[in-house]
Every structure is written in structure tokens, then in C-alpha cells.
Amino acid sequence: MTVKNSTIGYPRIGRNREWKKAIESYWKNECTEAQLHEQLEQLYIQQIAVQQEKGIDLIAVGDFSYYDHILDTAFMFNIIPKRFKQQNLSKLDTYYAMARGNEAAQACEMTKWFNTNYHYIVPEFADAEPTLVENRPLAYWKKAKEALNINGKPVLVGPATFILLGKGYEQKDVSTLFKQLTPLYVQVLKELEEAGVEWVQIDEPIFVTDQANDYWKEIDAFYQELAAAVNELKIVVQTYFESVTDYNKFVSLPVSGFGLDFVYDEGQNIAAIRQNGFPEDKHLFAGLIDGRNIWKGSLSEKQAFIEDLLTFVSEEKLVIQPSSTLLHVPVTVKSETDLDEQIKSGLSFAEEKLEELHLLIDLLQNKHEKVNQYEEELAKFLQSSSRLNSAVRSELANITDEDISRASTAERQLLQKKKFNLPLLPTTTIGSLPQTTEVRQNRLKWKQKQITDEQYDQFIQDEMKRWIKIQEEIGLDVLVHGEFERTDMVEYFGAKLDGMTVTKNGWVQSYGSRCVRPPVIYGDVSLSETMTVKESVYAQSLTEKVVKGMLTGPVTILNWSFPRVDLPRHEIMNQIGLAIRKEVKALEENGIEMIQVDEPALREGLPIKKEKREAYLHATVYAFKLATTDVRDTTQIHTHMCYSKFDDMIATISALDADVISIEASRSHGNIIASFENFHYDKEIGLGVYDIHSPRVPSVEEMIHNIDRALSVLDKQLFWVNPDCGLKTRNEKQVIEALTKMVEATNQYRKKVALQLN
Ligand code: GLN
Ligand code: ZN
């Protein structure tokens, strides 16, 4: 059997986030540029060495990055905005300035990479004059060859993906950009060929969207030129995260191999092959191991799938690999020394996925010994009784439409106005208050058992007490407890809910050096003990003003976790919804009658394929309502979302039926307001009046201006004044100053309104 295995990409961060530490110490001037290069090169070689040890035939090289691979691509082609070029910084500092901004220039925009939680730096094509600054893939290929004597597979971002994910160009400029970039790609490939590279991988995930459709002529022309320019070098065009949108066009590109995702395609890719066949003279790079989730899968099922593929493509031309780069999963299960053994036996992170690839090759060669061991481990996990909770399942099955509906908006508004008796334009915040070094240090000490539970609780209480007082002094109308007890708005709940767990070292890169540790949903989710009542009740006991209860919603908990794969996503979401429903109820029973359920990840969970979006939105509304409707009409449900691209979702947002929503708005310069011109939104709403992402404290005038702009389309009786998002990343001084000005702006505005009324 000559089936080969391959990788598409690998985590950069190292087993213990050495990558993050090195980069951040460079930013803090704690190490020199030379030291940074030395450390990162070592990490790069380590990541290749692991793949070599695990017996990978075709190892992706050059997917490594000092920040982000799209930024690398822009940098390599000299797509560097003027505001950075003119600063005459060193190469490395220009690179980091683009990513992070500096005093002289605003950072490039950052946005989500397809439907993952990875964020890339958006290339700016306005005034771009593309040239080839450096053949990065070649440099990385050489490093790997020198250190480990491998002929790796250099990875490049393809031009369609690179251009269409960028900004600053009009539709008509796309052809020009293709023309400008083509000779540069040609040069990169020729040099790779000369050096002796056998395979090069060109990533075109954009082919799974419908964005590329309009530019097929340019795409085809580009690949024709590449093909004409090289002789021996073989190109694989790689797609992932969904099925390729136009299979026939895709497989007619003049390259040597095609990469398809057979895990996240919902059967569409294999259906296309069955229907149309696969070109005889081409290689199929088959993504069979889940590159984005962390579960082991049945190898015998995969073996059967491979045998099916072999009826369409010969052994020599089949390459098996993960469904995408492994960048989106943690490095190794071996670091999880505290995890329940049964759960652990079901897990597979990046290193383990490499082993799975190897085992699959074993299977094809009829070597069963290790495979049997693997399947036994997996069975241990699958059969674990902690995964099934029949009570939750039957409770969910018995929920009726009535259970998830409330009185009409108008009725609730009337009752709630009376109950809370808030002034016009009530002021509040989004929930979190500064997570200072002190807060984090105390949590660490507590985790390391250097302080007792009592000491830690006392610290959190003192912090709440101090901030309730500060909020009262500032004059806010609705207060928050501050979320000091939470590391993260999802992890906190992941650690407390049954059926979910958190990892010790399961870090994945989110953006730049920032890594997150998504919780793991391994079984049916339920609530056995309340999660937030203690803190909320304590905070409320300190003041006459209302303190909002603060929870994360089911959609966000699901979207920011690693979900199990044996239940449909909407069912998992509903289980979480039911658990949150009980928490909401418990808060209400304990006197917390204004409760916020955050859903910042609702929009980013939108499926890549348009035809799947409606079902998704419908499911999110159901789960959110499940979480929030078991309350009295007088109890006010709030929600918060961080984004402002709203126009295509406003009906969904209204359907959530929250009494009050707060959303980010100050950075979108009024774009969001236009969405309300065409949609009559009858619930209460707070559009953020200042940007919390920047340390700058805005002026009273700016905030008045923002309120003014919002009230040109929104009803002032329904409007709230709040910042854009939570304040946990800001320092105390900035927060106090900004909120004081926010209250001042509101007061001035109220006076103005009162004058108009007289
Ligand atoms: N309540 C959370 C906070 O204030 C909301 C954060 C978010 O939406 N990302 O931090
Ligand atoms: Zn937010």
C-alpha cells in the first residue's frame, strides 16, 4: 500500500506557549531581535521534528509565523500601508506595528478566519504596489531541510483567498491585483522548484464560500500561469472548513493535486466525487482527521472511507491528512495531567492526531496491534456513563412553545418601567471591570493553593465592595458585580457545568500572541449547583441600586468550546440553554431581577454556507429563549453582543426577545444606526457610546454626539447609555474617568431633553 500521509499546518505556540512568551518579551523589550529569532526558529524546528518523528510523509513547512500567516503573506508581497512604511522602522517592528498599531499609526484591522476563533490581519490593498520582498516559504523550507533533512511541503496562501479577504479595493481592481501578484507567485514557485521542492501547498479556503465565483476567470488564468512556469514542482490547491462550492471548476484547475475536507463538508465533497468522478492523473489530498476538534474518531470507519476513495483514485495518488491545519487544536493531551482519565481516553490534540494518521497507514497495511489499543481507549470514553443524562434529555423533549414565550414586549415594558423606575437614558456597563494584576495574582495563588478558599472569596468580595462604591459615586443607574471571579466568560461556566470540563494546557491561538483555552463539552450538559448566585446576591446586598446578574448564553458557550461530535450542535446548545435557564431562575428566586445573558459569539457562529444560515439562526433563537424565558414579566432580561454588522441579523436579534440589548457601536461610525432605519425595533437598546478597545478616554462631547446620532433613529424612551463592551482589559483610572464622563454626557443630554419638553 502506498497511500501517503501529510499535514496542512501545525500549532505554532509550542507545548507550553513558549511562542507567546518569546514574542511578548520582545514587545516588552526584554529580549533582543536576535534572541527572538533564535527562540522562534527553535520552536519552528521542534514542530517539524515532532511531525517527522510521528512518521508524516509530507510535512507542511512555512506555516509557522511570528504573528499571523495572512500578515506574513502581505508582508512578503510588500502590501504594507504607507502609515507604517513612512515610519522607517526595522522590518520586524514594521511587521508588529501593522499587527498591533503604535503611537503614530492605527493597527491594521483584524477579523475572524472563516468560522474559526482564529483572527487574521486584514491586508490593505489601497495604494498597494506588490513586489516580492522575501521568498518566505523557501527560507522556511531550507531551515527544515538543513535541520532535519526533510523535503517539506511549503505552504502559501493562494491569491484568491488573499485578495478577497483583504480590503481597500473595488471589485474592478481584483483583476489588476491578480495580475500584479501572478509574477510574484511565479517567482516564488520557480525558486522553490530550483531548490528541489517536490510539493507546494496553496491554500484557497475561499473556494468553499461563494465569494470566488465571480472571479473564476482570474483564478483560472492565475493557475494556468503557475502551471506553465513550473515543470517538476507539484502544486496542491488546498481547501478546508466546508465543501468546495464548485467542484467541477475546482478539479479542472491545471495543478497536480486537490485538497478536500471530508470532515466538515457534511458529505458534499464525497457526493461530488461520486457524481463527477475524480481526475485520473491528479492527487487527492483527503482531509479525514478532524483538524478543528479534539476527539478521537473510529479508525475503522475511516479505513472504510479510504477504501471507498480508492475506487475513485489510485493508491499512489491518495494522500491522507487532517481536515485543516492543526493550528486550531491544542498541542498535546500529554500535558493534561489533571484531567479525568475516562475523558482523556477520548481526546486527540495535534500530536495525537499525527499518531492517528500513522495508525491509519498501519491499518491499510494490515497492522492492527496499535490500532486495537487505540479503539479500546476510545470505547472506554464512549461508554462512560457520565456522558448520558436522561433527565436532561427528557426535560428538553418536553419543553413546549409556551415554556419559551413571555408576555408581549409592550406589556413587559410597562411593568418593568414601573418596577425599576429608572431615569430617562439609564446608564450601565457591560459587566466586567478591570482584571488587574492583583486580581489575576490572587486567582493564581488560590489555584496553586497558596491562599485558602476563604481568603480568595474574601478578596473577591472586597473587590466587589470597592467597585460597587465606585459605581455609586460615579452615578451609574444600573450596577454590575464586576466578574472578578471569572478568568473568562466561557471557561468559568465550562468549569462549573456538568458535562463540560476545562483543560490545564489546552491553549489555541486566538489572535496574535493571545491564546484561549476552550472548554470541552464531553457529555450531556446540566446544572447541578448554581454558578453565579453567591456573587450576585452579595453585590446586590451592598447597594440600593439594581445590580445586574451576569451570565454567558448557550450560543456563545457552545461556539467557544470544543463540542462533542455525537450530538447535533443545536441539541448541545439546548442542553446548555436549559442549564442557564435554571441559573436564571435561581438568580430571580434570590432577588436578582435584572439578568444579562451575553451572546457575543452569536454572529460569528454563522455557517460559511449561506443556505445553512437560517437554520442556525433559528436554533440560536430557540436556545436563547430557552435560557431566558422562565422568569416573571417584571424580570428584565438583558443581552450583549460585541459586533455591529447587524443589518442582516436584526430580525433574529429582535426574535431573541430580550428586554434590553447592548451592542458595540462607537467604532462603526453610525453604520449600525442605518440598520434601524428600516426595521422597527421595539425593545430597549444601548448602543455603545465609547470604544473600550483603546486606552484613550473619550470626551463628553464625543459621547453626546454618539447619543445624539443614535437618537436620530431610536426612541429615547427605549435607549440606554453604556460602553461598547466589558471593561476588564482597561485599567482602573481609565475606567473611572471614562464612566464619569459617560454619566456627565448623559446628564447633559437629559437636561437638553427636559428643556425641549418645557
Ligand atoms: N459581560 C462580559 C464582559 O463585560 C461581556 C464580554 C463580551 O461580550 N465579550 O466582559
Ligand atoms: Zn462585547
Image: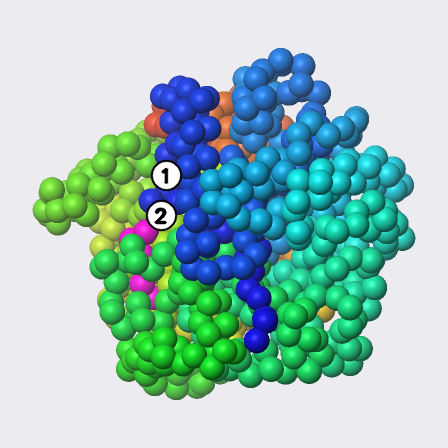
> Left of 604 or right of it: where is 612?
right
State yes or no: discs 2 and 1 in contact (Cβ < 8 Å).
Answer: yes
Relative to 96, is 228 on the left or the right?
right
Residue at the spot 46% in from the left edge and 35% down from the top edge: 41
Depth check: give the residue in front, 160 or 527: 160
**Residue 566 percent location from the top left of the image:** 46, 78
Q: Nearer the viewer, residue 119 or 254?
A: 254
Q: Residue at x 30, y 58 (%)?
A: 334
Q: Is residue 553 visible in this depiction of the protein?
A: no
Q: Amino acid at mark 1?
A: Glu
Mark number displayed over residue 18? 1
Residue 377 or 341: which is nearer the viewer?
377
Label 2, residues with CA under 10 Å away: few <14, some 14-19, many ≥20: some
Q: Over which residues does the magenta segment extend?
A: 500-505
* Dominant secondary structure, magenta: loop
Can residue 487 be seen from the camera position used here? yes
Up/down of 378 relative to 244, above or below = below
Q: Quadrant of the C terminus?
A: top right
Q: Quadrant of residue 242?
A: bottom right
Q: Amino acid at mark 2?
A: Arg
Locate residue 48, reporting x and y percent. Answer: 47, 48
Label 1 crowd (10 A; few <14 / some 14-19 / many >=20): some
Marking on residue 650: none
- Residue 594: x, y in percent? 39, 54
CA gap between label 2 and label 1 equals 7 Å
Image quadrant containing the N terminus: bottom right
Residue 687 sits in quarter: top right
Task: Name the residue rendered at 61%, 50% in the picture.
Answer: 153
Q: Which residue is mark 2?
A: 15
The local secondary structure at tag 1 comes to helix
